[in-house]
Image (tube, rainbow, N blue to C red):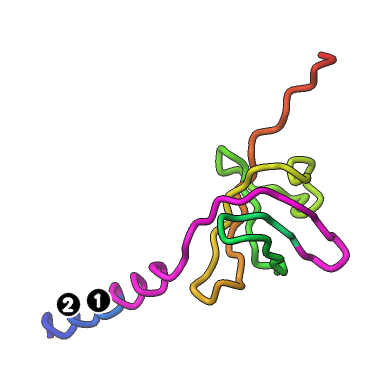
């Protein structure tokens, strides 16, 4: 009985590990944000790419805080350096890690 339970737990861990192993982090620079089409165009080492953003995509700040503004976040502008967490299919964006907000010079 104990062997089956341990074997079952091992199989679940292997499946979970394989699913997470497919994700990869990509450093990118924002080229264009299209809120209506829910698309983000970025420049990566491999060239310019456009990703469609889903409702499941998480937008996280540098301290892992969630951005409710999503594509309308003021940090997501042309030239901003971000990190994308992309699925193994190279099309699904799981997470967008945003940079710190720029300090207002007038303050």
In magenta segment, residue 30 = yes
- As rendered, which of 68 and 27 lies closer to the eye? 27
- As rendered, which of 7 and 54 lies closer to the eye? 54
Give above or below for 89 relative to 93.
below
Left or right, 78 with respect to 82, comes to right
Q: Residue at x 56, y 72 (%)?
A: 90
Residue behind mark 2: 6
Q: Quadrant of the C terminus?
A: top right
Alpha-carbon span between mark 2 and mark 1: 5 Å
Helix, strand or loop status at disc 1: helix
On the image, the x and y values in percent for residue 66 come to 64, 48
Hey, which residue is sitting farthest right in the picture?
36
Residue behind mark 1: 9
Decide: marks 2, 1 in contact (CB < 8 A)? Answer: yes
Q: Residue at x 88, y 65 (%)?
A: 36
Helix, strand or loop status at disc 2: helix
Give above or below for 57 relative to 19.
above
Identify the magenta region: 13-39
């Amino acid at each position: 009985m104990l062997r089956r339970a341990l074997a079952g737990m091992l199989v679940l861990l292997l499946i979970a590990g394989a699913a997470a192993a497919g994700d990869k982090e990509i450093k990118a620079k924002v080229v264009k944000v299209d809120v209506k089409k829910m698309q983000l165009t970025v420049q990566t080492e491999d060239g310019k790419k456009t990703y469609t953003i889903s409702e499941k995509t998480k937008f996280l700040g540098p301290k892992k805080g969630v951005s409710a503004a999503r594509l309308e976040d003021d940090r997501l502008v042309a030239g901003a350096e971000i990190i994308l967490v992309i699925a193994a299919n190279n099309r699904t964006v799981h997470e967008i890690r945003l940079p710190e907000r720029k300090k207002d010079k007038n303050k």
